[in-house]
Image: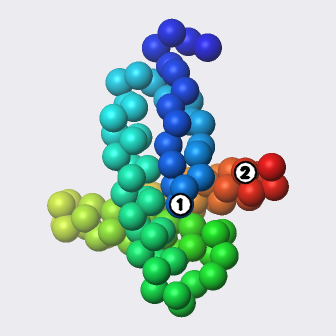
């Protein structure tokens, strides 16, 4: 492994995930994981959504919506279809990783 990249353990809904990350990005990644954990706990706590995968999808959609709204407010422009496609790809990758982890 690249010496500037190391594995970071993050915890989301009390499950540990090992993530390879550049050392310079680990603090941001840790904060992102904590934010995701809070959002997923809020959704699970509402009692309206059952199942880890569904909770993850709803959390991802909420976070993507927040991001797109902030981008639009900042730039004054609508978000491009390419940005939305990129976010969807990231969400799908995250869901695939979550599904693989659940199978273990």
Check residue 101 in the rendering and tell me which mark sits there, or answer none: 2
Along the line of sight, which residue is nearer the eye, 95 or 16? 16
Along the line of sight, which residue is nearer the eye, 7 or 4? 7
Check residue 28 in the rendering and tell me which mark sits there, or answer none: none
Residue 48 x/y as whole percent:
54, 90
Residue shown at the point (44%, 60%) measured from the top left: 37
- The chosen color scheme is rainbow
Residue that label 1 marks: 13
> In the visual, does 51 lie left or right of 20?
right
CA distance for labels 1 and 2: 13 Å
- Numbered disc 1: secondary structure: loop
Residue 9 x/y as whole percent:
52, 36
Residue 12 x/y as whole percent:
52, 55
Q: Earlier in the sequence, mark 1 or mark 2?
A: 1
Q: Relative to 49, does residue 2 appear above or below in the rendering?
A: above
Q: Residue furthest top?
A: 3
Residue shown at the point (29%, 70%) measured from the top left: 69
Residue shown at the point (66%, 76%) measured from the top left: 51
Residue 65 sits in which quadrant?
bottom left
Whether tag 1 and tag 2 are in contact, CB under 8 A, the answer is no
> In the visual, does 30 lie left or right of 98?
left
């Amino acid at each position: 492994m690249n010496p500037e990249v190391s594995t970071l353990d993050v915890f989301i809904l009390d499950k540990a995930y090992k993530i390879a990350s550049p050392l310079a990005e680990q603090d941001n990644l840790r904060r992102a994981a904590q934010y995701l954990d809070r959002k997923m706990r809020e959704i699970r706590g509402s009692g309206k959504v059952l199942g880890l995968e569904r909770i993850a999808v709803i959390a991802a959609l909420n976070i993507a919506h927040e991001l797109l709204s902030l981008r639009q407010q900042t730039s004054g422009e609508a978000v491009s279809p390419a940005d939305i496609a990129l976010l969807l790809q990231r969400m799908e990758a995250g869901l695939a990783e979550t599904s693989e982890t659940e199978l273990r």
